[in-house]
Image: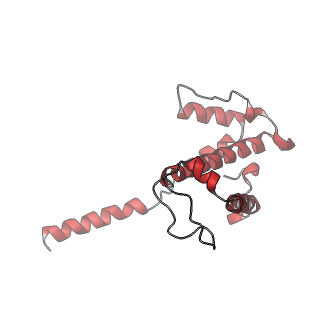
Amino acid sequence: MNISSFLSFALAASSASAFVSTSSKSNSNALAATTNMEGLKELAKAQNNVVQYYDPLALAEKDFWDQGEEATIGFLRQAEIKHGRVAMAAFVGYCVQRNYQWPFAMKVDGTPFPASNMSPEAQWDNLPEEAKWQIFTFIALLEVLDESNCGDLEARPHYMRGGQ
């Protein structure tokens, strides 16, 4: 066995460990501890020594829908994660749509998609009402699927009942 085959084998074997998950569950334990105010404040101090805990509207202290503090914290956590993902997807869509256009017609009658040299706002204004309602319906479907399957997947509780 020469040195190059030995090195290639060693590199291949060492990179395989990058795809193996760790057995530590410290993240889930840290999140599970943040279902009350004390846990939130401790986690905030551990993550940011300068700002520490910051809730200017005191939303975490509220009791949404008479479900308790833990349910409110779970709801706010889920809403923050969901809105962050939507904002990231919107930013990518805003950047990408100026450079690319679907290669086929938007409607059966041959109406093309709005030109890619227009601003995103002008493109949205040029979409037909049916297309806008299709987008909103798809978003609503995703919301319904998220809520209806939230507590059932893998026997996990709902995010307002301690699920992550």
Q: Nearer the viewer, residue 24 or 14?
A: 14
Decide: is 81 above or below 44.
Answer: below
Decide: is 3 above or below 44.
Answer: below
Quadrant of residue 36 in the image? top right
Residue most toward the top? 50
Query: At 29% across and 66% down in the image, what residue appears?
Result: 12
Scheme of image coloration: secondary structure
Query: At 26% across and 63% down in the image, what residue appears?
Result: 11
Q: Position of residue 14 (x, y in %)?
A: 31, 62
- Left/right placement of residue 116 relative to residue 147 reads left
Instruction: Evaluate whether residue 85 shows in this view.
Output: no
Q: Nearer the viewer, residue 141 or 73?
A: 141
- The quadrant in which the N terminus is found is bottom left
Query: At 60% across and 44% down in the image, what residue appears?
Result: 30
Decide: is 117 above or below 17.
Answer: above
Q: Nearer the viewer, residue 72 or 144?
A: 144
Q: Nearer the viewer, residue 55 or 129?
A: 129
Q: Position of residue 110 (x, y in %)?
A: 59, 71
Q: Position of residue 54 (x, y in %)?
A: 64, 28
Query: At 65% across and 36% down in the image, what residue appears?
Result: 40
Instruction: Evaluate whether residue 140 shows in this view.
Output: yes
Residue most toward the right? 66
Number of numbered labels in the structure image: 0
- Left/right placement of residue 26 relative to residue 61 reads left
Q: Position of residue 72 (x, y in %)?
A: 76, 42
